[in-house]
């Protein structure tokens, strides 16, 4: 994982997103650069694959980036204690190195001498050799005083729970009995769950293929096509991945197909709209299971291209449209039998997979997102034929986006009837829908409400 310090280059250098082959220093410098947008509140971790890191260090690179994001509140509080004065704004990359160093010392099984030496040394690769001594000093002090410093910063609940105060409050209010468990689940990486392509074989046969490849896994409890791996692995190691035999998709997300099964299974050729489809996880699953005419829309052209790639790998076809689902200029005028609205949302149910949400999401985003969801619902409902089904989904656990959103929709939509099932073994009723809360080692947080348009 790390190389001895004497093998590292001594000359200062600065490179931007170039391929660096300097072992432990380079991977830490790359992680620091990747973290700058997140810690400055300007961008997410989504571009990680653009950072060129040698293959043997990619797993460490991702673990450093995701782990640091996940534990950011505590790392930042400790950094503030360790520094005599904060770094200047232009030295956010050095601040990122300090956070990375603290994360390694407290959370990763990396030898302390490598965590300190290679993190401090990485400042040279950022062209900031002056920071090496500061970083060394701070990290060595943390080694000596870790217990006292942690106890001090953990007095703040936002630090101890690794969540921003506003989100703790929102979770407490929505889930008075479960908010702590939600925070705990958000702080642990989610498992890697697969969806077996039924057109290529069943999941029992795929379990055998995994076993033959030495990959340990178990069947999902609620999603009939789902398999959860005991340990995440590179998708290229999954048997038949390139041929579309399997995809990566959380168990909660796979329940879309269970919920739409009664509407779609008896209706071959049904016109289906997936109104916010990218990157195409649910589009692909529905097409694997049902012989339908799929229309898939998304307003983000780059993300829509990923749907095309995903369907290409699976050997499936849909009519893709780049469009705004709060408008109708992409619509051909024929009503849909079924609509899936997997709405843009806060992502508060998938924080463990996108820990930068804790830093980047603001409380003021929630009403803005709720308004967008309202507009989407109101624009799409008239496109549904009488007797048709609309499934509303979010990966949120907040009421404004879920039970309250659907309650107000029902109050202004007299021809909408609730058909969300009550007799299922997953989630719990929340208003007219069902809420799944994120579970350690199991599914993400998700909300579903199934509605039928009363025949005219
Ligand atoms: C939760 S994601 C959808 C995930 C997708 N259904 C899947 O299973 O892979 C929400 C999507 O909504 C898209 N979106 C946001 N606003 C939109 C709008 N006004 N019209 C259409 N798509 C929109 C986003 O680009 C994003 O891809």
Image (tube, grey):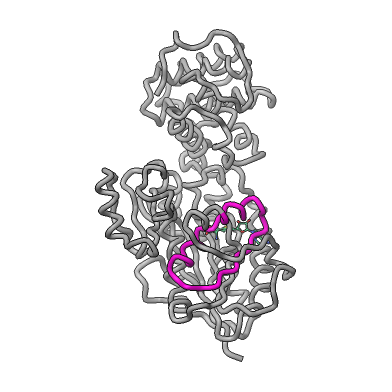
Residue 174 within the magenta-colored segment of the rendering: no
Residue 173 visible, this angle: no
Residue 93 visible, this angle: yes
* In-image side of 188 versus 126 (left or right): left
Q: Residue at x 25, y 47 (%)?
A: 212
Q: Which residues are magenta?
A: 279-308
Quadrant location, the C terminus: bottom right
Image quarter of residue 12 = top right
* In-image side of 184 versus 304 (left or right): left
Q: Please, is residue 65 above or below residue 260 in the view?
A: above
List x then y, in percent, for residue 152.
Answer: 47, 30
List x then y, in percent, for residue 229.
Answer: 33, 49
List x then y, in percent, for residue 256.
Answer: 47, 67
Residue 306 within the magenta-colored segment of the rendering: yes
Q: Residue 284 or 111: which is nearer the viewer?
A: 284
Q: Residue 334 or 144: which is nearer the viewer?
A: 334
Q: Residue furthest bottom?
A: 456
List x then y, in percent, for residue 420.
Answer: 47, 76
Q: How many discs mark residues in the rendered view?
A: 0
Q: Please, is residue 187 above or below residue 53 in the view?
A: below
* In-image side of 406 versus 378 (left or right): left
Q: Residue at x 46, y 60 (%)?
A: 253
Q: Residue at x 64, y 22 (%)?
A: 87
Q: Residue 131 or 182: which is nearer the viewer?
A: 131
Q: Please, is residue 428 above or below residue 141 in the view?
A: below
Quadrant location, the N terminus: top left
Q: Residue at x 58, y 49 (%)?
A: 166
Q: Please, is residue 71 above or below residue 361 in the view?
A: above
Ligand 1 position by quadrant: bottom right
């Amino acid at each position: 994982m790390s190389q001895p310090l004497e093998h590292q280059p001594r000359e200062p250098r600065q490179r931007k997103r170039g391929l660096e082959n300097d072992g432990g220093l380079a991977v830490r410098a790359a992680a620091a650069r990747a973290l700058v947008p997140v810690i400055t509140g300007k961008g997410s971790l989504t571009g990680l694959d653009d950072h060129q890191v040698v293959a043997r260090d990619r797993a460490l690179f991702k673990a450093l980036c995701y782990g640091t994001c996940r534990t950011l509140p505590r790392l930042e509080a400790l950094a503030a204690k360790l520094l005599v004065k904060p770094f200047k704004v232009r030295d956010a990359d050095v601040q990122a190195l300090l956070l990375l160093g603290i994360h390694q010392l407290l959370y990763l099984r990396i030898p302390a001498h490598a965590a300190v030496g290679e993190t401090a040394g990485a400042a040279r690769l950022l062209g900031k050799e002056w920071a090496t001594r500061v970083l060394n000093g701070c990290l060595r002090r943390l080694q000596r005083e870790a217990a006292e410093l942690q106890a001090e910063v953990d007095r703040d609940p936002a630090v101890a729970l690794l969540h921003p105060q506003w989100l703790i409050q929102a979770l407490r209010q929505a889930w008075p009995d479960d908010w702590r468990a939600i925070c705990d689940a958000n702080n642990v990486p989610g498992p890697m769950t697969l969806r077996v392509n039924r057109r290529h074989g069943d999941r029992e046969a795929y379990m055998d293929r995994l076993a033959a490849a030495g990959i340990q896994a178990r069947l999902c409890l609620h999603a009939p096509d789902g398999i959860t791996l005991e340990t995440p692995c590179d998708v290229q190691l999954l048997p038949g991945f390139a041929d579309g035999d399997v995809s990566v998709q959380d168990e909660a997300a796979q329940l879309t197909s269970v919920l739409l099964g009664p509407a779609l299974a008896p209706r071959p050729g049904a016109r289906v709209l997936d109104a916010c489809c990218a990157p195409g996880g649910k589009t692909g699953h529905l097409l694997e299971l049902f012989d339908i005419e799929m229309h898939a829309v998304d307003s983000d052209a780059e993300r829509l291209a990923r749907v095309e790639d995903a369907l290409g790998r699976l050997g499936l076809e849909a009519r893709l449209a780049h469009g705004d689902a709060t408008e109708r200029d992409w619509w051909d005028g024929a009503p849909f039998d079924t609509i899936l609205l997997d709405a843009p949302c806060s992502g508060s149910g998938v924080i463990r997979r996108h820990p930068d949400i804790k830093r980047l999401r603001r409380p003021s985003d929630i009403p803005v997102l709720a308004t967008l969801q309202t507009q989407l619902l109101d624009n799409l409902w008239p496109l549904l034929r009488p007797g048709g089904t609309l499934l509303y989904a979010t990966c949120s656990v907040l009421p404004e986006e879920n039970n309250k959103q659907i309650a107000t929709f029902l109050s202004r939509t007299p021809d909408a009837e609730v058909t969300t099932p009550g007799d299922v073994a997953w989630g719990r009723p929340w208003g007219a829908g069902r809420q799944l809360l994120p579970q350690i080692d199991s599914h993400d947080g998700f909300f579903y409400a199934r509605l039928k348009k009363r025949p005219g």
